[in-house]
Image (tube, helix red, strand yellow):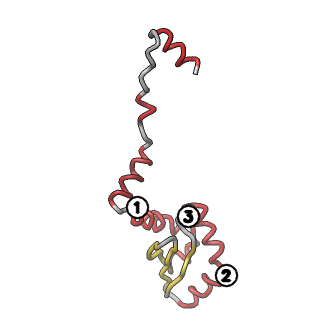
Amino acid sequence: MRRNQAVRDWRGGIPEADSIRDRIDPLSALLQRELKFLGLEKRFAEEEIAAEWGALVSAFIAQHSRPDSLKNGVLYVQVLQPALRDTLERDMKKTLLKRFQDRFGADKVRDIRFRF
């Protein structure tokens, strides 16, 4: 604040030109805008989740399932065996949902549904 006033006084009342840093958006904001404009935001989110799948679930689950799609905040997961689907749904759904919400945001992943 004082710096701006000092520069204005030194220049005879002419305000200092905006610095270029004040007008530059972060690259992440630019990418987010472009993905949305191109309609690829949803697809990017799906790819991001698929890439992190193995890190957020156990090795066994990663070998026997994969994220299939993300629609309206619901992550659909394809599971190879009905018994595993039942176990995931009954015993692990809350834990997995919390992990994905912590990593990607509760607005992006609101629920997980397992399909055989």
Q: Which amino acid, by three-letter code, is at mark 1?
A: Glu
The x and y percentages for residue 84 are 57, 86
Residue 68 image-quadrant placement: bottom left
Q: CA distance from mark 3 to mark 2?
A: 23 Å
Depth check: 37 or 92 in front? 37
Q: Which labelled disc corresponds to residue 98?
A: none
- Marker count (numbered): 3
Query: Relative to 98, does residue 36 appear above or below in the rendering?
Result: above
**Outermost residue, left direction?**
38
Q: Which amino acid, by three-letter code, is at mark 2?
A: Asp
The x and y percentages for residue 80 are 49, 86
**Outermost residue, bottom direction?**
82
The x and y percentages for residue 12 are 45, 9
Q: Nearer the viewer, mark 3 or mark 2?
A: 3
**Which residue is denoted by mark 3 in the rendering?**
107
Position of residue 96 in the picture relative to residue 8 (left or right): right
**Which residue is denoted by mark 1 in the rendering?**
41
